[in-house]
Image (cartoon, rainbow, N blue to C red):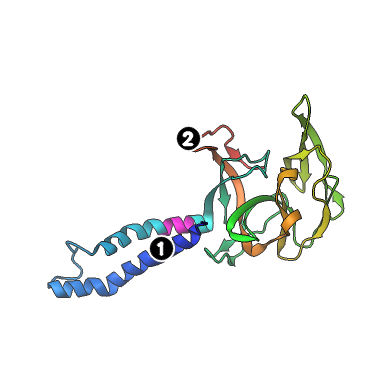
Amino acid sequence: MDLDFPLILVTAVFITGAVWLVDVVWWAPFRAKRDGVDSHDTEPSQPAVVEYSKSFFPVLFVVLVLRSFLYEPFQIPSGSMLPTLKIGDFILVNKFNYGLRLPVLGTKVFSVGDPQRGDVMVFKFPGNHKINYIKRVVGLPGDTISYRNKQLRVNGDLMSLKLIAQLPPGSPRFQLLQEQLGDVNHRIYINLMPGGRSGEWVVPQGHYFVMGDNRDNSNDSRFWGTVPDKLVVGEAVSVWMHWNKFWSLPSFAHVGSID
């Protein structure tokens, strides 16, 4: 079962805050009057629900503000962004770069900036808004994207590729390439076997065309379409830990910014 953590967090903040407010306005004065004490004095005891609400509300509220408007951690679940991101990488997503959005609803209330070509972006999967995806922004609103013979063109311009290695060296099955995508220089994997999804797409206004860096092993806009702006979560900016398996030790060998 998919848990909607943002919804759970917002609900918890609302409930604990409401209990605290109701206690201050009604319950505490009622108890003071009933027990014949000054309502401004510290009460020797309070109902458990009030004590827990007063304890948890400040913490939950701070967590809500941080993960909703500033930064949120995610873990990479698949190899679609290899070689840039590995399975088990823990990344930090900057949510402020793309504007302030309401928790759960995702409605932008204050514009700071928009996704740029080459950004590594986290978004809610259009087919299931409870699932977060991470891909690289290839096409901006109004762009024409073409992908044929494993070559990417944006508005008719071929994105340059530089061969780094053929892997494995003895009997290569794929290539490691350096791709220039707008102002961003990053690495991608291409399978040497012929085939793969090809086509041409026009990006609608208010949408983004995204692809994985592991081009032949990525479920992306070539298959299910573009990403509406309302589903954008934030920009992946850094890797802060790698922990592939629960029983293994975490690694900090490739901590750093994401290209």
Mark 1 Cα within 10 Å, few/some/many (few <14, many 20+)?
many
Say which of 12 and 248 sits in front. Answer: 248
Asked whether residue 120 is in view, the answer is no
Q: Position of residue 165 (x, y in %)?
A: 77, 30
Magenta-highlighted residues: 61-66
Q: Quadrant of residue 191?
A: top right
Q: Position of residue 209 (x, y in %)?
A: 73, 56
Query: Residue 190: within the magenta?
Result: no
Of tags 1 and 2, the one toward the viewer is 2
The quarter of the image holding the C terminus is top right
Question: Image point 62% across, 44% down: which residue?
Answer: 78
Q: Outermost residue toward the left?
A: 36
Q: Position of residue 169 (x, y in %)?
A: 76, 26
Could you tell which of marks 1 and 2 lies nearer the N-terminus?
1
Question: Image point 57% across, 55% down: which residue?
Answer: 95
The numbered dot on residue 247 is 2
Q: Position of residue 45 (x, y in %)?
A: 19, 62
Say which of 84 and 8 sits in front. Answer: 8
Q: Which residue in the protein does label 1 denote?
A: 13
Q: Which amino acid does the dot numbered 1 rest on?
A: Val
